[in-house]
Amino acid sequence: SERDELLARRAAERKEREFRQKQLAEAQKKQRDLVALQEARKRQEEEKRENQQRDALTQKEEHENALRQAAEMARREEAEAEMAQRKNAEFRAAIQKQINERESARKARQNDKFAEGRKAQEKMREDVAKMETIRDKMVQDLRDKGVNEKYFSEMMRLDVETFLMK
């Protein structure tokens, strides 16, 4: 009976050690998951800032190019108008034809810019869908791992499109 008590006590102690080890392992896993999530958020914020800086630079360059082109076009049109005044009606008609062709080319470029805008919007929609898929997968992974809902409820409330537009 002493032997049975000793064996029972040792078994209870072993179970207690195993239980504590299991709790410790779960706590460490939760901590690792939390750190990974925080790192992912930090990377996303850094990428967002980089993208915003790159977009701002691109917009500035496009604006400066548009101003230069507009100034250049204005100078050319003024010179062409002076030339047209000195030439006879037939030559003025030829110049007017050139101006019309250039205007068509400018409109075509402008239409190309609009097409680029539509492409950018489509890219944004794709990015939003991709980010939502990633978020949903991360949330599902957290749920599958048994992480408490309160740790990722903020991720679920996040409006990805608004987040990417910032």
Image (cartoon, rainbow, N blue to C red):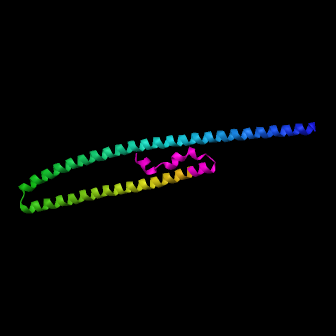
Place residue 108 in its image quadrant.
bottom left
In the rendered image, the quadrant that contains the C terminus is top left
Considering the whole magenta stretch, tell me its main secondary structure: helix
Q: Position of residue 133 (x, y in %)?
A: 52, 54
Residue 143 left/right relative to 25: left
Q: Is residue 147 one of those drawn in magenta?
A: yes
Quick one: 77 or 132, which is closer to the camera?
A: 132
Q: Residue furthest right?
A: 1
Looking at the picture, how far across and down is residue 107, in whole percent? 25, 58
Classify 31 as above or below 129: above
Q: Residue at x 86, y 40 (%)?
A: 8
Instruction: Write down the quadrant of residue 95 in the picture.
Output: bottom left
Magenta-highlighted residues:
139-166
Q: Residue at x 85, y 37 (%)?
A: 9
Residue 96 colored in magenta in the image = no
> Image check: 50 left or right of 137?
left
- Observer-nearest residue: 46 or 34? 34
